[in-house]
Image: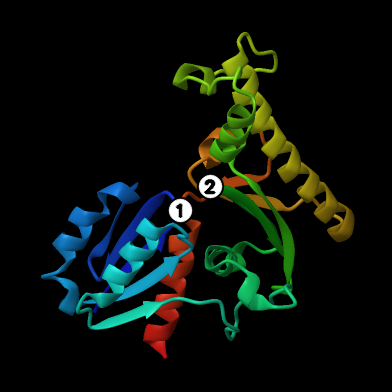
């Protein structure tokens, strides 16, 4: 049976349809989810749904509810749980770990030891050692949140224009460039500091798996070894769905 994998975030919905003949995938802002849901109504009985949601907004919660109400052959809203062969979670209370981070860890198992950065609405950092143990990392505001927090509290500062966000420093030529480069380099510094701490503990510099909407932007300033994995959460969902189908 074909599987529909959905990664529902705070700003976007990402999906992947896995069938015997191949995959299709896409992404769009939450505001455009209505057409996607309507298009699923007729095909839902022939699909299994695997939903991972970290959406905290009312709109995101409504989308999750509407998805789960469709007549799928199987519908599972994924939650963090112990999994045979999965990562050995480092949180005292695993339920506090976001399901997106857990799925990213699951997808990253084949690359361990490694560091993992999900760069979206927030930046989250985690790591896996050779034994599959989870080394929890940090949570920071993402690029858009950093910019918005700064400009909201300092009215004389304006949000960067698109061309200013594309500027490559290190020395900005406008206030917009200064904010964009400052936000970007602040996150890059956090990622590199986390990798340095891992290197001190592990004795080698781990590969970084980088995912999320801001991954490509941050990758330009990060040091190797690095692997861009734009859909790491969907990769984890696919691994989970495949494992359940084989049992």
Kindly identify which residue carries mark 2: 121
- Image quadrant for the C terminus? bottom left
Residue 77, position in %: x, y? 40, 76
Q: Are marks 1 and 2 in contact (CB under 8 Å)?
A: yes
Mark 1 to mark 2 CA distance (whole Å): 7 Å
Asked if one can make out residue 68 in the rendered structure from this viewpoint, the answer is yes
Name the residue rendered at 62%, 14% in the picture.
175
Q: Position of residue 55 (x, y in %)?
A: 45, 60
212 on left or right of 154: left
Instruction: Kindly state the secondary structure of the residue where label 2 is placed.
Output: loop
Relative to 182, say whether 187 is above or below: below
Residue identified by numbered label 1: 10
Left/right placement of residue 92 relative to residue 12 reads right
Residue 221 at x, y = what percent?
65, 31
Q: Residues within 10 Å of mark 2 (few under 14, many from 20)?
A: many
Query: Dot 1: few (<14), some (14–19), or many (≥20) neighbours within 10 Å?
Result: some
Q: Quadrant of the N terminus?
A: bottom left
């Amino acid at each position: 049976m074909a599987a529909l994998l959905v990664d529902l975030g705070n700003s976007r919905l990402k999906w992947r349809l896995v069938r015997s003949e191949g995959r299709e995938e896409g992404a769009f802002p939450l505001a455009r989810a209505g057409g996607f849901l309507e298009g699923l109504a007729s095909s839902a009985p022939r699909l299994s749904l695997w939903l991972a949601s970290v959406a905290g907004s009312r709109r995101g919660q409504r989308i999750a509810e509407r998805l789960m109400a469709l007549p799928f052959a199987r519908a599972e809203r994924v939650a963090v749980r112990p999994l045979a062969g999965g990562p050995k979670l480092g949180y005292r209370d695993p339920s506090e770990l976001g399901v997106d981070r857990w799925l990213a860890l699951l997808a990253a198992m084949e690359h361990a030891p490694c560091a993992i950065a999900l760069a979206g609405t927030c930046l989250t950092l985690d790591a896996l050692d050779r034994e599959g143990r989870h080394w929890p990392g940090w949570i920071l505001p993402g690029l858009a949140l950093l910019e918005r927090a700064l400009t909201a509290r300092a009215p004389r500062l304006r949000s960067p224009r698109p061309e200013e966000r594309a500027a490559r420093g290190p020395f900005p030529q406008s206030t917009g460039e200064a904010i964009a480069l400052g936000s970007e380099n602040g996150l890059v510094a956090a990622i590199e500091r986390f990798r340095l701490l891992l290197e001190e503990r592990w004795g080698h510099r781990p590969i970084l798996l980088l995912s999320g909407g801001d991954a490509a932007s941050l990758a330009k300033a990060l040091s190797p070894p690095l692997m861009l994995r734009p859909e790491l959460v969907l990769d984890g969902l696919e691994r989970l769905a495949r494992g359940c189908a084989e049992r």
